[in-house]
Amino acid sequence: MIAVRALALIVPILAGQGALAQQPVNKETVEIGLSTDTIAITSGFRGTDLTVFGALDNADPLIQRQGRYDIVVILEGPARNFVVRRKDRYFGIWVNAESVSFQHIPASYSLASTRSLQDITTPKIFRQLSLGVNNIFYEPAPDGFGSSEALQEFTTELPRLKLKQQLYSQRMGDVQFLSSTLFRATLSLPANVPVGKHVARAYLFRNGEFLRESATSLNIVKAGLEFRIYRAANQHSLLYGLFAVFLAVLTGWMGRLVFRKD
């Protein structure tokens, strides 16, 4: 009797393990690499495009032939704090009025995808992944805003301003498959791209389902005379300030000699 009861307990367990073994496992992975790991910013920098190369591993050949794999690639700049202000007109003069402070916001954000985002997956999944300009979590600073209505208004305005400044961009269709497993993405870097460590991420989707993510980093640094001035200003701030004052006095004195009337 005891043996029969033990067998009755074991059979459901084994059946459950068999069901788990039969469940499909997502084996697909995605890897990416950049055309360069460092970009030097000089005085003549006017913006550029960054190429991201990637590959799918363990992809299903049938799904590949049907074109049901999608890739979204982003390049996210260093986190910064921002203040969004509203300008109002008082007595004919435009002045800063209400403002909202945000913290830990990407200073730049570039996105490229195989096709339009609405054709890849649902808005809910994009919100869960914080993927896309309108799905980034714009975190307000503590005590950095007034009413909830103002917060909602300024949260909507922040990405619009970033897009206008070309610090945020989205390029649909700029991820292209070069073969059944290799792909290439093109991302925009504006002339005013911030220096610092940027993170590139690739998101793999299959039939609208998010599968995997891969990431790598990119360093954007100043170079040439601008870099030397920038480094001097940060490492020797007192001497840099004294030199700036001296240079201003010298320039004023020389201007007086050149343009004097007598």
Image: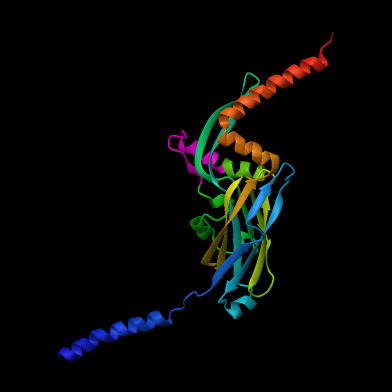
Residue at x 71%, y 51% (from the top left corner): 48
Q: Nearer the viewer, residue 262 or 128?
A: 262
Using the image, determine if residue 20 lies above or below residue 237: below
Residue 82 counted in the magenta span = no
Q: Nearer the viewer, residue 47 or 61?
A: 47
Residue at x 20%, y 87% (from the top left corner): 6
Which quadrant does the C terminus fall into? top right
Q: Is residue 1 left or right of residue 72?
A: left
Q: Residue furthest top?
A: 262
Kindly indicate the quadrant of the structure image that contains residue 242: top right
Image coords of residue 236 (percent x, y)? 57, 33
Using the image, determine if residue 47 lies above or below residue 11: above
Q: Nearer the viewer, residue 225 or 173?
A: 225
Residue 221 visible in rendering: yes
Residue at x 64%, y 58% (from the top left corner): 112
Q: Which residues are magenta?
A: 138-156
Which quadrant does the N terminus fall into? bottom left
Q: Residue furthest right?
A: 262
